[in-house]
Amino acid sequence: MAADHERTVAAPDAEEIELTRLVFGDTDGFHANLAKVDSLYHDAADADDGYSSDSDDASDDDDDEMLQDDDLFVIDDEGVAVNDDMEIDSDDDDTAGSDDAWNDSDDDEVTVSLTKSAKLKKLRKYEGDDVIRGHSYVHRLRAQFERIYPKPAWVDDWEKDNGDDNSSDQEVDATQSKSRDLAAVLASSVSYLQKGKTKLMSANHLGITRLKDANGARRAKGSIQAVDFHPKHPLLLTAGFDRTVRIYHIDGAQNPFVTSVFFKHTPIASCQFAPLADSTTIYAGGRRKYMNKWDVTSGEVEKISRLYGADAHQSSFEHFKVSPRGRFIGLKGDEGWCNLLNPSGQWARGLKVEGTVGDLAFTSDDSRVLIASTAGDMYEFALDQAAGAKGVNINQPVRKWHDDGVHVTCVSYGGTNDRWVAVGTQSGIVNIYDRVKLEAAVDSGSAPTPIKAVGNIVYPISTLEFSPDGQMLVIASRGKRDLLRIVHLPSARVFPNWPTSGTPLGKVTAVKFAPDNSMLAIANEQARVTLWRLTHY
């Protein structure tokens, strides 16, 4: 009987099969959608990491060739409004004539004793000054802040020119005039140039205090790879894997953001101001077969890519250095080549060494370039010799010597007349040479001996930066957090008091001194640029 009750199920027709596929999907559709998701994942990973595979690079380069220059970058000149919390009011108790942006009625009910702590005693106007109301306390704090961090002169000039009759108009101008702020700074007479002689530093103690982060007004969205001060004006640039170059006005107090440019297809590894005092040019390059030249005032961006015969030895513009006087842009090439460009981006000269180029460094007068191979061989080429001069081969080094370090990673000149030569290695050792003794030894056929081998870091050295006066050398590694030391010169002793175990440096990626030695900017992988005041200057 059971068999009689069984029913035969008919095979599904085409309409039922289509409905099932739409509701539940099928194998082919599953794999197709999975491939799309996987592709999206890789695109996101490339954006976060900043770099792509070699095949992606090749396709990107092909795509870039089809784009107009204007499609490769976006300029942001809006800036950001200064944080109200950092607003400075120099008025103290007698402030009836000025209105604050925010008034708290409870301030008049609060009283503060100025004798309970050493910090508050600094706010007293006379010895017996003790209890004051909250309103007066707020204004005294503001007045003390302004004494420590004075308002930049160009801000006063701008306020004088624009007036302060209408507060609402001021708020509009503060938002709309950021594009003019950069022009105001560049046109001002404010300069880093020092007057008088620099005093000698003590090797036993480094006087240093922390300032507000240089990029606190607008942070990067990825690891910062380059920082640089303008050679004359108080401007600092930052650049990194988020493809953006940002410029800040460094006043030590607010460090307002000024402007930025976004390069759509170039995670930036190297970036520098042109070193001329009145220059407004910035060079930026990454792991691409071109670099960008940005004129900050006009907003024009030019792509530099043609090396006219030397392209085969330059697969990337990732690592470059602009010479101190701006005559050359040195590119670390492939197969032992170093290509030199002129300021306009045209290929000027190619130099060849044995092995792989580890790094290069220019002398302060642009007359020599030192090219270091990773094997430790140092080649010094003369750049002021005329091609074709009798008895002169400009493609041969004028001096060659060997550093005993294992796998050279970076080199740098420093000091008056480039007295010091520093060589960093993969093992973390930094050899410091007195150039006078080095040249005498090499010219006599002897092996040069460093005056000091600094071994405080056991990770690969990624940064060597001399202070402009040559009294300090910063050595750093991005291999681990807080790996930074400052060496005093000429004693070649590491300063014992800084950094401490509590100094928030992170993984250091770039370091730069202000042109007058007064400040030190330290960038890290966490997208922060900490700013430090060197109190000796």
Image (spheres, rainbow, N blue to C red):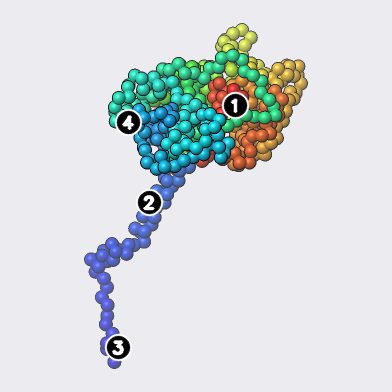
Query: In this image, 175 relative to 417: left or right?
Result: left
The residue at 59%/39% (across/down) is 503
| Outermost residue toward the left in this view | 15
Q: Amino acid at mark 4?
A: Glu
At numbered mark 2, what does the secondary structure look like: helix, strand or loop?
Answer: helix
Please identify, in this view, whether the residue under mark 1 or under mark 3 is nearer the observer.
1
**Of 485 and 95, which appears nearest the observer?**
95
The residue that appears at 45% across and 16% down in the rendered structure is 189
Verify CB contact (< 8 Å) between mark 4 and mark 2.
no
Q: Give whichever of discs 1 and 4 has the lower sequence position.
A: 4
Coordinates of residue 181 in the picture (x, y in percent):
38, 24
In space, the residues marked 2 and 1 are separated at their CA atoms by 57 Å
**Pointers 2 and 3 in contact (CB under 8 A)?**
no
Q: Nearer the viewer, residue 12 or 108?
A: 108
Q: CA distance from mark 4 to mark 3?
A: 89 Å
Compare marks 4 and 3 and give the one earlier in the sequence.
3
- In the rendered image, is residue 288 in sight? no
Q: Can you identify the residue that label 4 sits on?
A: 171
**Label whose residue precedes the other's in the sequence (4 or 2):** 2
Mark 2 or mark 1, earlier in chain: 2
Q: Amino acid at mark 2?
A: Lys
Front position among marks 4 and 2: 4
Q: Is 221 displayed left or right of 206 in the figure?
A: left
Check disc 2: other Cα within 10 Å, few if <14, some if 14-19, many if 20+: few
Image-quadrant location for residue 199: top right
Nearest the eye: 31 or 403: 403
Secondary element at image label 3: helix
The residue that mark 2 highlights is 36
Q: Nearer the viewer, mark 4 or mark 3?
A: 4
Report crowding for label 4: few under 14, some 14 to 19, many 20 or more residues within 10 A (C-alpha): few
